[in-house]
Amino acid sequence: METWIGSLPTEVQRAIVAFSDPHPPGSRARAVYAATALYELARAWPPDQAGLEVALQQLADRLLTVGQGTAHQPGVRNMIMFMLSEDCARPSELVAERLLSRLEDAKRAATTASAAMSAAGAALLDDGDRVLVHDFADRSTQAVVTTAAEQGKRLHVVATACRSRRADGLRVAREAAKVGHRATVVTDAGVGWVMGHYGVKAAFLGADAVMSDGTLLTTPGALTVAMVGKTNGVPVHAVTDLWKFLDAIRPEIQQINEDPDPDGVPEALNWAEQGYGFLNPLVDIVPGKYLTSYLTEFGQLDPASVGEVAHAQYGLGNPVPAPTATDKAQVRSPGE
């Protein structure tokens, strides 16, 4: 634990430790942990002590530097801005009351969003379907297969191994089996064959970030899933709330992806010992043209419309005009 974390109140420490876990259960969960840390700091602040506003901002700034970072997870930044968007120079008990209200709003929104997304995804599936799920995200992709089970649908869930940074493909299989589905794990190298030749009805991807034009930032390997799905006519759906809206891809993402991090691929250290460099990216970038739809808190959306909806509902970013018939005709599948 970093020294600065140890100097904070116990409940703030707990929220930060959960936030900085290298394998957290999704970016929405990280956003809630960040919000919790801010509230707990205000709650523990002595009423007669000045400086709470500065302390909250310092904590917010430090949260952006711990764990897997937030350059690829705008939902965390958006949550922090939401929490601190009102006057924090008031007495600490009033600030804590306001932050608690916002935290509870955020938690309710997350629960409601998860229910809407999972319902939209489960509605696309029938009993006996075979589906591919890429990486574990409890409130989005995993919620789809769990909801399907609650509806009496038994699926064959193919989980990608996701041997990559901060990913947990095996957990997809474990959790699917717990709710009664048949579960199979496919090697990352075998994803193309599974998507093209194994009778997959649909594939589901989680999200770290969503952009105005429908571009998706998510776990590495997703671009392969989406491109092969597009080529073979297998629907590929991104399951996410639009709170994860990202205006632009930050330069740090390139550096993050090039950093020699062996997480998920420990044998990479042996490659380094043999004098080889290695790449183990954290983020994949999937153009919206390869996705069938987004399953969101506002239902199923065309990828080209997510920017407009995010702007209308949350005031995030600027809407992108819907593509014209000419634009659509110019979109080509790989190999065309």
Image (cartoon, rainbow, N blue to C red):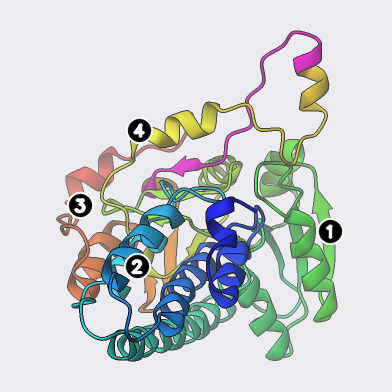
267 versus 196 height, above or below: above
Q: Earlier in the sequence, mark 1 or mark 2?
A: 2
Q: What element carries label 4?
A: helix
Residue type pointed to by label 3:
Pro
* Crowd class of label 2 (few under 14; some 14 to 19; many from 20; radius 10 Å): some
Which one is in front in this view, the residue at disc 4 or the one at disc 3? 4
Q: What element carries label 3?
A: loop
Disc 4: which residue:
251
266 versus 218 height, above or below: above
Q: Between residues 192 and 104, which one lies in front from this camera angle?
A: 104
Disc 3: which residue:
323
60 versus 269 height, above or below: below
Q: Which of marks 2 and 4 is nearer the N terminus?
A: 2
| Residue 85, image x, y percentages | 22, 73
Disc 2: which residue:
56
Res 184 label: 1
Q: Which residue is drawn at 28% across and 66% down?
A: 81
Range of magenta residues: 272-288
Residue type pointed to by label 2:
Leu
Helix, strand or loop for the magenta stretch, by majority: loop
Which of the 4 image quadrants contains residue 105?
bottom left
Which one is in front in this view, the residue at disc 2 or the one at disc 4? 2
Residue type pointed to by label 4:
Pro
